[in-house]
Structures are given as C-alpha cells and as structure tokens.
Image (cartoon, rainbow, N blue to C red):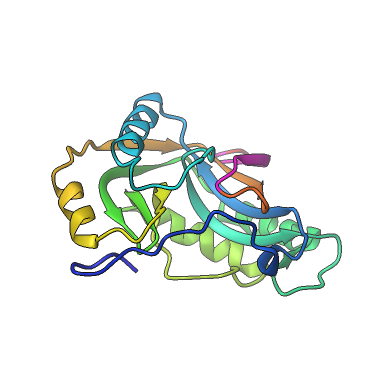
Amino acid sequence: MFIQANQFVIPTQQHDYPEWHRGREHYALWYLSIEHPALVQYLERLKQQFSDLLLTPNTRQFHITLYICGFSAEIKHWDDDFVEHQFQRQLQALQHLQLQPFQLQIGGINSFNSALFVDVQDHAQQLCRIRQALSTAGAEIAALQYHPHITLGLYQAEHSTNHILERIQNTAVQHFDLNIRHLNFGYYQAKTLQGPLFSSYQFPLGAS
C-alpha cells in the first residue's frame, strides 16, 4: 500500500480508460472538502515542490475521499453502477448517526505506490462511523484498505522510491486542525483524468 525502499512507483498513463467507464460519465463519491485557506496554501506548496514527479494537468480540488459509490445510473446494469435508491439509503443511514461537527488532524507527507499524499488523522474514529453507515447501501467500489488522506498527485513515471522517500524526509511538514461541518456527495467526469470534483449535495452536521 505504502511505498517501500529499493522499488519503483507505479505511473498513471495519460489516456482514456474505456474498459473502466464503458461510456458512463459521472463517477460518484462522498468526500470532505478542504475549507481552510492556510492548509490549501500548504498543499499547493507541496504539490509544487514535487511537481517534477507528478502527472499534469491536475485540476481536482484537494479533498478527503470518504466513500467511492460508483457510476451514477438510472438503472443498475453493471456492478459499479450507483442508483438513486442507494443514495437515499445512505442519507437515511447518515441521519440515524446524528453526526455533530468534528475535527481532523492533517500532517505528514507519505506515498502510496501510485500517488503522493498528506496524512489525515481521525482520532475520534468519525470517518469509520460514516463509512460504515454509507456501506449499508452496498459495498464500496474498488475498495482497498481505507487510509484517509489528501492526494497531492499521481506519479507520471517509474520514479525510484528511494529518491521519493529522501525528498519526503527532507521536506518541512506543517500540521493543521481541519473542522468538518458537512459531508459532500458529488462526482467527477470519468473521461477527464484528474479533472475537477462537482458537488451535487451537502449533508450538514449538527442539523436538527
């Protein structure tokens, strides 16, 4: 999952992936937006520092993925289609949680085999509760071991992990508290690699 010494990262190819999207357009997910100007500046600075390693263009907003739902569809045809009644079940499950605003801790730099990211710490385990509620409408698509993070970018070539680990170690780290007051449901366009996120619904926390 995380990079190890004496290996190479996995690059992302800059092309369409029709075998994945099968002509479908909107890939839906729940996520947390980053509404903290100083933190966004920090993330932008890190992305620029490592820009020689990362795939461009990258217009996707910094965010924390909560749950991958799949392709928005009117009728479920493929296993990774996501339909309206699943969304409504998720809303009901979230309402039962009676979530209050909470705080996450943002800090160190790390790397998956295919992407550079900034770590997210959830000491109160609120993200786990939210993900369990969202799972009541169906299993997460392409589920891997969940590790909350903010992606800085995907790798554009088979860079040496030793080189990346050394650069991470020599990079000054800042720490932030991020207040979460709502959850976002939205999508990105499947044919646009690293394209922007579009929010279509916000679930407020602490609402009566």
Q: Position of residue 112 (x, y in %)?
A: 35, 61
Residue at 28% of width from left, 36% of height from top?
A: 49
Q: Residue furthest top?
A: 37
- In the rendered image, residue 83 lying in the magenta stretch gets the answer no
Residue at 81% of width from left, 69% of height from top?
A: 76
Question: Is the residue 38 above or below the residue 150 in the image?
Answer: above
Q: Which residues are magenta?
A: 194-206
Residue 96 visible in the displayed image: yes
Instruction: Name the foreground residue: 168 vs 87.
Output: 168
Residue at 26% of width from left, 48% of height from top?
A: 109
Residue 59 horizontal side relative to residue 161, left or right: right
Q: Quadrant of residue 199?
A: top right
Instruction: Specify the principal SS of the magenta part.
Output: strand
Q: Quadrant of residue 110?
A: bottom left
Q: Position of residue 157 (x, y in %)?
A: 38, 57
Instruction: Name the foreground residue: 128 vs 22.
Output: 22
Q: Give the quarter of the figure containing the N terminus.
A: bottom left
Residue 121 visible in the displayed image: no
Q: Residue furthest right?
A: 75
Instruction: Name the foreground residue: 116 vs 72.
Output: 116
Q: Position of residue 58 (x, y in %)?
A: 50, 41
Q: Position of residue 143 (x, y in %)?
A: 52, 70
Count up the numbered dots: 0
- In the rendered image, residue 197 lying in the magenta stretch gets the answer yes
Instruction: Name the foreground residue: 144 vs 181.
Output: 144
Q: Give the quarter of the figure containing the C terminus.
A: top right
Residue 74 horizontal side relative to residue 61, left or right: right
